[in-house]
Amino acid sequence: MDCNQVFVSKVKKVIFVFTLLVAFLSLKNDTFAQVDSAIASPDSILAESAHAVSGEPAATAHGEEKFEPTKVIMEHIADSHVWHLWGHTSIPLPVILYTSGGLEVFSSANFHHGEHDYQGKYNKYRLVTGLKQSMTKDMFNKNIKVVGADGQIDEAASDTVIDFSITKNVAAMFIAIALIVIVFSAVAAGYRKRVGKAPKGLQSFLEPVIIFVRDDIAKPNIGHKYAKFMPYLLTIFFFILFNNLLGLVPIFPGSANVTGNIALTFVMATATMLVVNLNGNKYYWKHILTPDVPWWLYPIMIPVELIGIISKPFALMVRLFANITAGHIIVLSLISLIFIFKTLAIAPVSVAFVLFMDVLELLVAFLQAFIFTLLSALFIGMAVEEHH
Amino acid sequence: MVGSIAAIGAGLAVIGAGIGIGHVGGKAMEGIARQPEAASKIQTAMIIAAALIEGAALFGVVVALLGLQV
């Protein structure tokens, strides 16, 4: 029967892909077993990678380097000027600084992971890598400081330098943007070629999602003016979704914690705030500045409403950032268990937990994109609501 | 010392999330048991409520992590 043949061919494809996956995984297990056979090797590799990141001279002798999970996890979560691929392989990313003298562009390989200072055109620069990597540190503190003639860090000069570097998160964002443009150009081209006919391929995969955003997020919350805001809602939905999913992939071009960067979620929340408040009509501002309450409650209500204009996007920002970063920290901690206990025997338990957490993270990736878009649509709906 | 206080704070925040989401899940189960035809609608509403409650709990975790930096 024709249906049976189609089914059998699809099952064969699945079995083929599965065999490839098992072969790949068993190959990886072999290399891992070789590494673990020398007792001190995992420690020295970690020592070297810690050395590579922190720029401190690490004890390259075997065995005595203690694995510090906090440091390793924080370095995976935080942004950096170098995209570390595996082992000693990294991609050095360009450093672009706007100093008071002019524009400086150079490769971050010149820093040699923080060991050397770099003499640029206008100033001498040093990469400062602190052990206390924090999530908010990237937003306010600078990693590249100007070094004066005496070899000490010149804080006053460093404050005037604006850092426009292509860091790991920026590069990952470019990759996600390229992916989104490719995918959606293909979908749009499909609609142009197959006018009036049934969708095929990538088109048919994405059409239900786009219809879902239109019918379940935009229309119920915004009402009949939804078409004006569809581009914005679709953009933030797919941007967050693609970046969340790429963050779950463990190797290049994934593996960068983009949506877990509070600066990115800050910009997206600001965008929502601008869209909501610039489209607010008379009734929206009337509800904020002259709410429907007795006059003696105005001193309480008006400040609360004005704070509400800021606190709603603030909640959007923190929700997305915390969910994604927490998920990444959990997965990294479970993998670190293998290195803490220094035995391969814990690997099946650890990998099983990590698989479970990754499935949960997949759900969280979709859910957070959905919630961000839903709440944005809700706020837009509140802003453009007609008087009833 | 600061690290353990931050961890205790984060743990307390998560207790709140656990109670909240457990409550929402329980009511959703009851609703589905009463009217199985509405199961998918109830499930969607439950997932949305759970994500928002989790957002509130993660506020607590973020503040605990900020307290660690100070």
Image (tube, coloured by chain):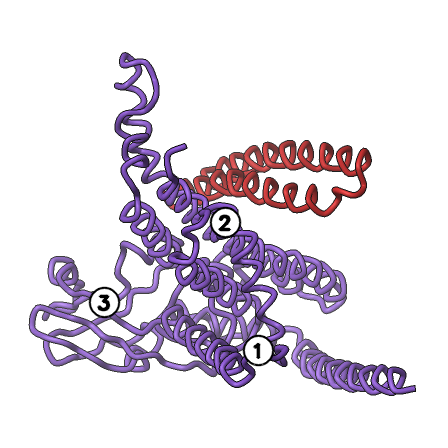
Task: Say whether disc 1 or disc 2 marks the residue closer to the N-terminus.
Answer: 1
Task: Say whether disc 2 or disc 3 marks the residue closer to the N-terminus.
Answer: 3
Q: Which residue is mark 1?
A: A196
Image colour for chain B is red
The local crowd at label 1, few if under 14, some if 14 to 19, many if 20 or more residues have their Cα within 10 Å, is few
Amino acid type, callout 3: Asp
- Depth check: give the residue in front, A316 or A351: A316
Q: Are marks 1 and 2 in contact (CB under 8 Å)?
A: no
Q: Secondary structure at mark 2?
A: helix
Residue A163: image tag: 3
The local crowd at label 2, few if under 14, some if 14 to 19, many if 20 or more residues have their Cα within 10 Å, is many
Chain ID at mark 2: A
Amino acid type, callout 2: Leu
Q: Quarter-wise, where is residue A13 in the image?
A: bottom right
**Gap in angstroms between the C-alphas marked 2 and 3:** 34 Å
Residue found 48% across the figure and 78% down from its top: A188
Residue B24 in the image, given as x and y percentages of width and height: 67, 34
Vertical placement of A298 versus A192: above or below?
A: above
Q: Which residue is mark 2?
A: A374
Amino acid type, callout 1: Gly
Which chain is depicted purple?
A
Q: Nearer the viewer, mark 3 or mark 1?
A: 1
Vertical placement of B59 versus A363: above or below?
A: above
Left/right placement of residue A68 relative to residue A32 reads: left
Q: Are marks 2 and 3 in contact (CB under 8 Å)?
A: no
Chain ID at mark 3: A
Residue A363: image tag: none
Observer able to see residue A86 = no
Q: Quarter-wise, where is residue A348 in the image?
A: bottom right
Q: Secondary structure at mark 1?
A: loop
Quarter of the image where the C terminus of chain A is located? top left
